[in-house]
Image (cartoon, rainbow, N blue to C red):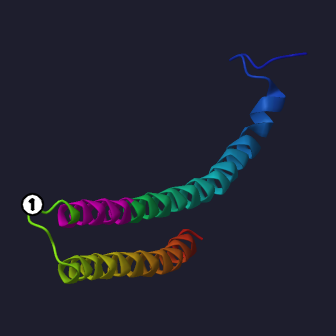
Amino acid sequence: MKTHPFGMDPAMMNASPMLTWWQQQWMKGANPMAQMQAAWMESLAEAMKFEAQFLKAVAESGQQMTDCLNNEEPATPQELQACYQKLVQQMTDAQQKRMEQAAELSHDFRKRLWEEI
């Protein structure tokens, strides 16, 4: 087989524009997938952040309950009930916030995907 004086095969010289075009199309196809995966990873990171905030609220609630029960002076049942009710309300609020953030997360994820498309 005869080669070009500069070392390139004539068939490759003719195919070069096609290879260049194919490479450009391939990169266009791979790039949106990478962007969609990045959007998914951002949403996942936000979900993990929300869960960490909720776990922090659970830990703080547990600590406050321990403080209520370890009071040096004997607590009356009314004081314990008030402390418990306060903690239940805090946990309810934390759970409500968690659910609201989870609902927003799916909308944000769809919005990010739509922007990438």
Q: Nearer the viewer, residue 111 or 99?
A: 99
Q: Kindly report the secondary structure that dominates the magenta region of the rendered protein.
A: helix
Residue found 52% across the figure and 73% down from its top: 115
Question: Mark 1 — residue?
Answer: 72
Q: Nearer the viewer, residue 111 or 102?
A: 102
Relative to 112, say whether 37 is above or below: above
Q: Which residues are magenta?
A: 52-68
Residue found 73% across the figure and 41% down from its top: 19
Quarter of the image that includes the C terminus: bottom right
Q: Nearer the viewer, residue 19 or 69?
A: 69
Residue 85 image position (x, y, % from top left): 28, 82
Residue 76 image position (x, y, % from top left): 17, 77
Quarter of the image that includes the N terminus: top right
In this image, 29 relative to 78: left or right?
A: right
**Could you say whether the residue bearing mark 1 is in a helix, strand or loop?**
loop
Relative to 88, say whether 35 is above or below: above
State yes or no: residue 96 in magenta. no
In this image, 36 relative to 8: left or right?
A: left
State yes or no: residue 54 in magenta. yes
Residue 4 image position (x, y, % from top left): 76, 20
**Dot 1 alpha-carbon crowd within 10 angstroms: few under 14, some 14 to 19, many 20 or more:** few
Residue found 68% across the figure and 17% down from its top: 6
Q: Nearer the viewer, residue 110 or 13?
A: 110
The number of numbered discs placed on residues in the rendered structure image is 1
In this image, 63 relative to 100: left or right?
A: left
The quarter holding residue 98 reads bottom left
In this image, 74 relative to 88: left or right?
A: left
Q: Label 1 is placed on what type of residue?
A: Glu
Relative to 104, say whether 117 is above or below: above
Residue 34 image position (x, y, % from top left): 57, 53
